[in-house]
Image (cartoon, rainbow, N blue to C red):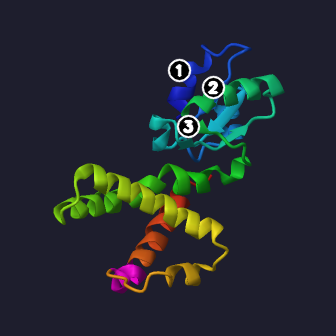
Amino acid sequence: MGEVAAGIRESLRPATVLVSLAPKLTIAKLTDLLGGFARIARMIPNAPSLVGCGYNPVAFGEALTDEDKADLLELLSAVGEAPIVAEETLEAYAVLTAMGPTHLWFQLYELRALAESFGLRPEAARKGLTAMVTGALATMNEAGLSAEEVLDLVPVKPLGDAEASIGEAYRTKLTGVMAKIRP
């Protein structure tokens, strides 16, 4: 990162706002690498930004004005939400919102392919999958039920015997990732 910082240091102007997408490198560290340049924001992007449904947490350096922040938030609104968060939470968001789709997409593609192999047309499988995911999240977040109660709503659990190993894989792998990217 030092080489990259050295390469851009001379291009930075007083009005420049640098937006870093890199986990682990704090605003203070970036300021140091950039020879004291402090007009920095850090953002954790996520892939759903491609379709305007991103959740891209952003933290602002102290050198940015309210106008700078408003301008950046307006720019980011084109790709979805950009909540302002504490810088020390950005790496947790990297695991949850930036990497999160990868934890689910392979499973969702498999479900959709199976639905089609069972006789649903592609459009019906897509609509059903979208409604299921939207409804499942609404149930988790809005039903007022505990996790145990939500998990007990559907009596048939074809993957029930794999839940413990899947949960362990999440805990092991994601804790390891967090250890690597935490400043």
Please tell me which residue is depicted at 74% across the width and 49% down the height of the picture: 86
Regarding residue 28, the answer to whether it shows in the image is yes
x and y percentages locating residue 94 in the rendered image: 55, 51
Question: Which residue type carries mark 2?
Answer: Leu
x and y percentages locating residue 98 in the rendered image: 51, 49
In primary-sequence order, the first of circles 3 and 1 is: 1
x and y percentages locating residue 131 in the rendered image: 44, 58
Position of residue 87 relative to residue 166, above or below, is above
- Contact between marks 3 and 1 (CB within 8 A): the answer is no
Task: Give the residue at mark 3.
Answer: 21
Task: Give the residue at mark 1.
Answer: 7
Which of the 4 image quarters holds residue 10? top right
Question: Which residue type carries mark 1?
Answer: Gly
Q: Which residues are magenta?
A: 159-165
Q: Find out whether residue 162 is within the magenta segment.
A: yes
Please tell me which residue is depicted at 29% across the width and 56% down the height of the picture: 125
Question: Which residue type carries mark 3?
Answer: Leu
Position of residue 76 relative to residue 162, above or below, is above
In the picture provided, is 177 more to the left or to the right than 111? right
Task: Give the residue at mark 2.
Answer: 75
Disc 3: CA contacts within 10 A as few (<14), some (14-19) or many (>=20): some
Marks 3 and 1 sit apart, C-alpha to C-alpha, by 17 Å
Q: Nearer the viewer, mark 2 or mark 1?
A: 2
Please tell me which residue is depicted at 34% across the width and 86% down the height of the picture: 161
Label 1's element? helix
